[in-house]
Structures are given as structure tokens and as C-alpha cells.
Image: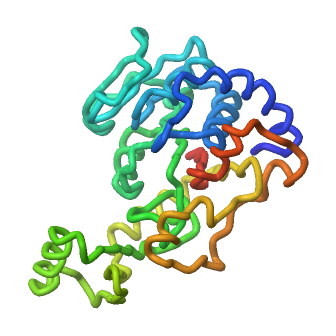
């Protein structure tokens, strides 16, 4: 979808915008890698309508408005109280995206940005029913790194294996799990690993025939599936340092990302931007459907 020369050329105009971002510490929201990806996607597609599912503090809304000044934006979040950036000409909605009627929008000129931490499998019927064509998915992590299905998993035919870590100090979660365990609420055999600080629970693969059919159907409709590369070499330890530190997980050999846009010594960012690199990179992707 993009070659390296195009991406390198577009970084300078992006940084001119990004240096004036209203929220300098956008923890839990998009940072430089994904903001640059969104900048490039929107400039390439140039939609008339953007549906943003997941608003958080409003930094993404700000970026969309800077890139596409005339596009109509629908910003959706079930909790809009976290917003620090608000616009009068943006349509804010506080119910799930599936609760609204989108029939009047030209689907060829509409982009949905999913950044709402909802399993992508739960969006398939909605996408099919409304005939959406252009989708950007933010938290597009592979198996073993997230608790729900992502486009990456579905496209690469991965079946979700859920993991849960419960510290012994978290009495509430521990009791809740034990009750469910002895009630046999889990389908299939779960695997338990006991550490001196926590229990690691690995849930079995479990996919229904109906869901498998939906995955097959969506894969057939995909014309373009493109994962945006990180700006610099992906640092797994930096990205997942919390889980590595707290739960001693091993670095998987199967975790792969696209080759970085810039080599190690090819570009130097300011200190604050260097600190943002890779911190929340999660294989952000663009999907174009038939």
C-alpha cells in the first residue's frame, strides 16, 4: 500500500502537525507510530466521512481534523467524560457504533477507525450488514498478546488462546476464578501454572462452527490487508515490559512485525518522541473490503 520512500517523505509534514498535538502524554491512546499511520491512511483514502469508535481524550479526533478539514466526523465512546479536546462541528455519540443507523453514508467514502477494545469478531455482522468498505483497526495484536480476536488473527487464521494472570494478592479475582473453576464454567480443559506471586491460566482454543464461517466469509471479502510498519525497529521488551516484568513471560519467536521505515541511525527524533516509539505499537492495519 505504501513504499518506504513515500512514508519517509511524509514524515516531515506529519511531524509539523504532531509537534503541536494538544495532549503530550496520551497514555492509553495513540502515540507517534499509530498517529503517523493514521495520517498516512487518511491522506491516501481521503474519506468524506470518518466514524471514530473509541475517543478517549480526543487526540485522534484532533489529528483527523488536521488532516481532513472538510470531512464529517462521528466520534463515538460509551464514556465521553475523558475528553480533553472537544469540537463543536464533530458529532459525538455515546452508544456503541452498532446502535446507530449509517444507511445514509456513502460507504465508498467512509472510514471506520476501531480503537474501542472490542473483539473484531463482534463487528463482522455489523460490517457486513452496513456494507462498510474501509476499516482501520488500532489494537491489532497477534495471538497470546490480547484477550480478543483482531483482524490480524482472523486474516492469518489464528485461533484465540486466552491467558489470564491473577496475583494471589488480588483476593476478589482469585475467589471469582475459583468459584467458576469448581462450577465447571470453562469449556474444555484449562491449563494452570502456579508461580509464587500469581497463577497463570491458559484457556483452551474454542471456536464455534458459526464463527469459523464468519471468519472465512470476511477473509474472502478482503481486497487489501495492510499492517503499517513501525517507524524504527520494533522493541518487544520495551512494548511488553510490564507483562515481562510482572509475569515472566518468554519472548515468542513467532512475534513478527513489518520491517521498520527507518534504520537505527537513519533518523533521530526528539527525546519525547523517542520515548513514544514502540511503546504502544500494535500492528495497526487498514482493511479494504469488496
Residue lying at 76% horizontally and 57% vertically, measured from the top left: 233
Instruction: Please name whichever residue, 288 or 172, is drawn nearer the observer in this view of the structure.
Output: 172
Residue lying at 84% horizontally and 38% vertically, measured from the top left: 8
Is 288 situated left or right of 160 in this image? right
- Check the image and tell me how it is coloured: rainbow
Residue 203 visible to the viewer? no
Above or below, 118 against 16 in this view is below
Q: Quadrant of residue 99?
A: top left
Is 217 situated left or right of 252 in this image? left
Instruction: Please name whichever residue, 185 or 265, is drawn nearer the observer in this view of the structure.
Output: 265
Q: Position of residue 93 (x, y in %)?
A: 30, 25
How many numbered circles does the render carry? 0
Above or below, 120 against 195 in this view is above
Instruction: Please name whichever residue, 46 or 268, is drawn nearer the observer in this view of the structure.
Output: 268
Q: Position of residue 10 (x, y in %)?
A: 80, 31
- The N terminus: image quadrant: top right
Residue lying at 19% horizontally and 75% vertically, measured from the top left: 174
Q: Quadrant of residue 260?
A: bottom right
Residue at the far top: name it.
Answer: 88
Residue 180 visible to the viewer? yes
Q: Position of residue 228 (x, y in %)?
A: 68, 49
Q: Position of residue 29 (x, y in %)?
A: 48, 40
Amino acid at each position: 500500500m505504501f513504499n518506504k520512500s513515500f512514508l519517509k517523505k511524509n514524515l516531515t509534514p506529519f511531524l509539523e502537525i504532531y509537534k503541536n498535538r494538544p495532549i503530550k502524554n496520551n497514555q492509553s491512546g495513540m502515540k507517534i507510530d499509530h498517529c503517523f499511520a493514521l495520517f498516512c491512511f487518511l491522506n491516501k483514502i481521503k474519506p468524506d466521512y470518518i466514524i471514530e469508535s473509541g475517543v478517549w481524550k480526543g487526540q485522534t479526533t484532533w489529528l483527523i481534523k488536521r488532516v481532513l478539514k472538510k470531512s464529517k466526523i462521528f466520534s463515538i465512546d460509551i464514556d465521553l467524560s475523558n475528553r480533553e479536546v472537544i469540537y463543536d462541528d464533530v458529532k459525538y455519540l455515546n452508544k456503541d457504533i452498532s446502535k446507530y443507523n449509517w444507511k445514509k453514508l456513502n460507504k465508498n467514502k467512509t472510514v471506520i477507525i476501531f480503537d474501542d477494545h472490542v473483539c473484531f469478531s463482534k463487528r463482522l455482522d455489523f460490517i457486513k450488514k452496513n456494507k462498510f468498505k474501509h476499516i482501520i483497526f488500532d489494537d491489532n495484536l497477534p495471538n497470546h498478546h490480547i484477550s480478543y480476536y483482531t483482524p490480524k488473527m482472523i486474516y492469518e487464521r489464528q485461533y484465540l488462546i486466552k491467558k489470564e494472570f491473577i496475583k494471589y494478592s488480588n483476593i476478589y479475582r482469585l475467589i471469582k476464578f475459583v468459584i467458576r473453576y469448581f462450577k465447571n464454567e470453562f469449556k474444555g480443559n484449562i491449563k494452570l501454572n502456579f508461580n509464587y506471586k500469581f497463577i497463570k491460566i491458559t484457556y483452551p482454543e474454542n471456536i464455534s462452527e458459526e464463527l469459523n464461517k464468519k471468519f472465512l466469509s470476511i477473509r474472502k471479502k478482503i481486497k487489501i490487508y495492510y499492517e503499517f510498519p513501525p517507524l524504527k525497529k520494533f522493541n518487544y521488551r520495551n512494548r511488553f515490559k510490564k507483562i515481562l516484568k510482572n509475569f515472566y513471560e518468554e519472548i515468542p519467536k513467532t512475534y513478527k512485525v513489518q520491517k521498520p521505515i527507518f534504520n537505527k541511525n537513519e533518523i533521530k527524533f526528539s527525546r519525547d518522541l523517542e520515548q513514544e516509539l514502540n511503546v504502544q505499537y500494535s500492528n495497526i492495519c487498514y482493511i479494504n473490503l469488496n
